[in-house]
Amino acid sequence: RDATLARAIKKADLLVHATSVQPRGGDARLLLEMLPIAELSRDALAMDLAYSEPPTFFCEATAAAGRIAIDGRSMRLHQATT
C-alpha cells in the first residue's frame, strides 16, 4: 500500500468509488487491496457511484471496515428526477 494514499484517505471527509472496476472479480479484489479503507476517518463517508444490485463490493468492504457507505442508487434516483 502507498503511504501517501493512506495519509490522504485518513484526512478525507469523503471517499468516492468512481472507477470502471466491475462489482466482483479479480479487479475488485486488487482495488480493495490497494485502497486503505480502514484508514478512512470514522466520521467520513464513502460513496459508490455504481448502482448495481446492492451491496456493491466497495460498500461491503467499507462496512466491513466499520465505515459508513452509500451506494449509487440515490444518485441514480435524483438523476432520473431531473
Image (spheres, grey):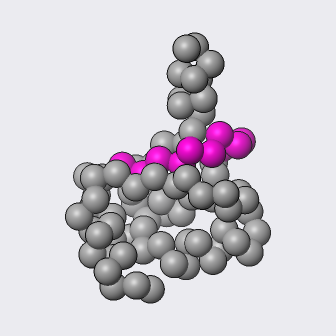
Give the farthest residue toward the right: 25
> Where are the magenta residues, as a range?
45-54
Image quarter of the N terminus: bottom left
Q: Work out whether residue 53 or residue 26 is closer to the camera in this orientation and state it.
A: 26
Q: Nearer the viewer, residue 32 or 63?
A: 32
Expressed as whole percent of the image width and height from the top left, the position of residue 68 reads: 40, 50
Q: Is residue 76 left or right of residue 38?
A: right
Position in image of residue 55 (x %, y %):
63, 48
Residue 63 drawn in magenta: no
Q: Position of residue 8 (x, y in %)?
A: 29, 70
Specify the quadrant of the image occupied by residue 25. Answer: bottom right
Residue drawn 48% across and 59% down? 62
Picture coordinates of residue 13 (x, y %)? 28, 52
Q: Quadrant of the C terminus?
A: top right
Note whether residue 60 is visible: no
Question: Dominant secondary structure of the magenta stretch?
Answer: loop
Q: Residue furthest top?
A: 81
For image coordinates 34% across by 76% down, the residue present is 6
How many discs appear? 0
Residue plotted at (48% across, 43% down)? 70
Q: Is residue 81 visible?
A: yes
Residue ID at (32%, 80%): 4
